[in-house]
Image (cartoon, rainbow, N blue to C red):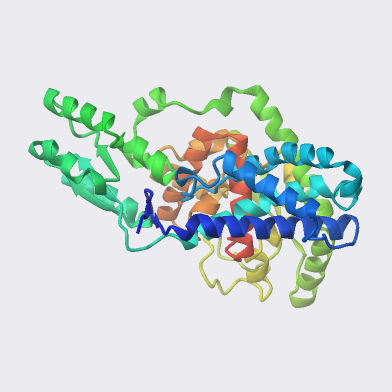
Amino acid sequence: MNLQRSFFGVYYPTHKLTLLVTDLLCIALAFFLASKARLNIAPDYLSLEYVGLNIVIISSLFIGGAYTSSTLESRPRLPLNTFFIVLAAAIPGLLFIYLLGPERFTAILGRGVFPFAMAGLAVIAVLARFLVNSAFKLPNRVPNILLLGSHRTQERLSKSLEIGHSKVNLIRSEEIEFIKSRASNLSAIVISPDHTLDEREQQMLIDYRLAGIPIFSLSDFFESFLFLVPVQEINNDWFIRAQGFTMLHSSVAIRVKRAVDIVAALLLLVLNIPICLLTALLIKLTSRGPVMFSQRRIGLNGTEFVLYKFRTMRVDAEVTGAQWTSKNDPRILPIGNFLRSTRIDELPQCWNILKGDMSIVGPRPERPEFTSDLAQKIPYYDLRHIIKPGLTGWAQVMYPYGASIDDALKKLQFDLYYVKNYSLLLDLNILLRTILVTLRRGGR
């Protein structure tokens, strides 16, 4: 049986066939939703026009590489290439429509059904592929990583890689010549900063890299495979030399991000007016006190601002002073856990976004009572304040719920990854993953 190998998993041969079937179902769902919303009819799935359009879209996915082995792996990234391939497939789709004659596609072109369907398909297909890719990962394969470094570094790397269930083996200098015999089961070679390569090791590693074995510095490995910046493994020199952080000095990126924030916040507010009104009513009926809750938070460049939320705790929740929220916190209202898990309690922060205090995507804003202590105990903690805080963020979709100094350290590593590697594509990744987290009621 020919299994497809990837860094974090192995795929059965049926993986691609499952993706093909899933994509066809996604197309059917997208056109059904668009047709019902725009024309209040269901598509004729057996018509020549609809079948032909399916063939065009699936062919575009094939040509775009959506079914190649290299694009199937999605941990922890979403398969966002599918999003853009689907959008690009609209072009040959329109050509197909006009070649056969637009008059035959009134049910697909009428009132904008086609663009609505393709936009919806782009989102649905990404989420569906993420779920399919996750289902096809086999837990019994443990990625094998060879480390050139000390036992102390091996322990730190092994602990950090617990989320990937990886196996870290320490290479002694004299063993480096025998790596090639293990290459078929090798995921990567990692070089620790506490290991100095001699000339023989350098030459051997060059040969291995040319032979296709991936080789990383310790910090690059964390960034490339765990999608975080390991603050305990870097120093000031790393910040001086590291590539990235382009958003900090790109006025165009900052303006585009601000424009997206305004449009997205307005849409969220308008679309969720009924939910907001219902939430306010339920809070009033189930507890005493105000519906809204305000709290001072730390924003861009360390400045304070007032953050707004729907109240999910008792009014006397902090009579003894500021404290972390814990799992199954008794201070939370009966309806509070639902509001938190679905992130409905965060909707009033759209006003913070419109005011310019926050962004849609960014590090979550922390309370000033906590930040002063965290900045003293966690290296580079204040760097998360060099961009606007967000309604959702990379740490929120990559790390489970936690409220402690250790959790703050781990979340900071994801926040710094976001600051270093910011792009509109990464923002889209985070937003789509936020949808998945919310649907699974994994909000925090």
Spot occupied by residue 33 in the image (x, y as percentages of width and height):
79, 59
- Work out whether residue 139 or residue 190 is closer to the camera in this orientation and state it: 139
Residue 425, compared with residue 243, is above or below; it is below
- Number of numbered tags placed on the structure image: 0
Kindly identify the residue that appears in the image at 64 percent across and 63 percent down.
Answer: 439
Kindly identify the residue that appears in the image at 55 percent across and 71 percent down.
Answer: 329
Spot occupied by residue 382 in the image (x, y as percentages of width and height):
49, 38
The quarter in which the C terminus is drawn is bottom right
Query: Left or right: where does residue 385 sit relative to residue 238?
Result: right
Residue 216, compared with residue 413, is above or below; it is above
Kindly identify the residue that appears in the image at 52 percent across and 39 percent down.
Answer: 418
- Work out whether residue 268 or residue 337 is closer to the camera in this orientation and state it: 268
Kindly identify the residue that appears in the image at 67 percent across and 60 percent down.
Answer: 25
Spot occupied by residue 205 in the image (x, y as percentages of width and height):
21, 30
Residue 225, compared with residue 257, is above or below; it is below
Residue 305, compared with residue 141, is above or below; it is above
- Work out whether residue 406 or residue 41 is closer to the camera in this orientation and state it: 41
